[in-house]
Every structure is written in structure tokens, then in C-alpha cells.
Image (spheres, grey):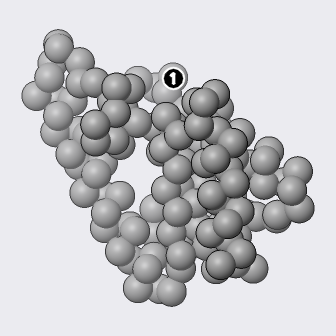
Amino acid sequence: MKNIRSKNTTPELLVRMFLHNNGYRYRLHDKKLPGKPDLVLKKYNTVIFVNGCFWHGHINCKEAKKPKSNSEFWENKIKRNQQRDKKNTNSLIQLGWNVLTIWECQLNKDKIESTLSDIVNKLVE
């Protein structure tokens, strides 16, 4: 598991490249904020988390299948990740941040355009 990256993943890089190419500037992994959000757009008072479907237990997602071996370990691990995500999101909202969560499956070829345009729409609201 030490080879699993938490920063600079392919889905995260896709979102970062899109935002940068469209003139949005951001900070990465701000340690001062709960959960160290992947992207912090201070001008828009928004943070973005780009979550892997498996690691964060995306509900009803085919990419979030639980392994058959050592299933109890994985179930507990993913449940802890979900609880931590919820706690961090609530903390950020209490601090006045808008929180966007982008799932890995939303960046598949057939959904990426609508997902990225949704991000821009939520930033300008």
C-alpha cells in the first residue's frame, strides 16, 4: 500500500489542468485546513476534494467494489475514511468554505465534460 499515492493522482491532475487552463488559480493540499483539501480556491471560498471511488467508498459505484480477501479489514478501513471525510467536510462548512467532492468515476470519458463544467458553474454561483 505504500505505493498508493494520495497526492497528484491522475483524477486530481485532470481537474487541476482543466481549472488552470480556464484561468482559475488555486493552492494545493493546504495543511491548515481540515482534511488537507486537494485544491483550495480562496477567491471563490471553495475547496475541492478529488476522491478515489474505492478508497472513499463511493456508494453504488462499480469502481468501489470491496475485495473478497481480507474483507473485514477493507470494510473497516473504508468506513473510517468515510467518517473522516464527513468530519472534515462538516468542519470546513463550519469555517465558511464551500466544499465540492469530485469522484474518480465522474472523470471517466463519458462524464468528464459535464463534471468539469459543473465545477465551473458551482464556482461562479
User: Which residue: 48% across, 44% down?
Assistant: 103
Report x, y in % for residue 36. Answer: 53, 61
Callout 1: SS: loop
Number of numbered discs: 1
Q: Is residue 97 visible?
A: yes
Q: Is residue 47 above or below residue 79?
A: below
Q: Nearer the viewer, residue 112 or 5?
A: 112
Report x, y in % for residue 83. Answer: 25, 57
Q: Quadrant of the C terminus?
A: bottom right
Q: Is residue 117 above or below residue 112?
A: below
Residue extending farthest to the top is 69
Q: Is residue 42 visible?
A: no
Judged left or right of residue 95, residue 31 is right
User: Which residue: 35% across, 58% down?
Assistant: 85
Report x, y in % for residue 7. Answer: 60, 42
Q: Which residue is mark 1?
A: 3
Judged left or right of residue 32, residue 63 is left
Estimate how packed mark 1 is, as few (under 14), some (14 to 19) or many (20 or more) residues with alpha carbons within 10 Å. Answer: few
User: Disc 1 marks which amino acid?
Assistant: Asn
User: Which residue: 71% across, 75% down?
Assistant: 124
Q: Nearer the viewer, residue 118 or 76?
A: 118
Q: Quadrant of residue 9?
A: top right
Q: Quadrant of the N terminus?
A: top left
User: Which residue: 71% across, 62% down?
Assistant: 120
Report x, y in % for residue 61. Answer: 34, 33
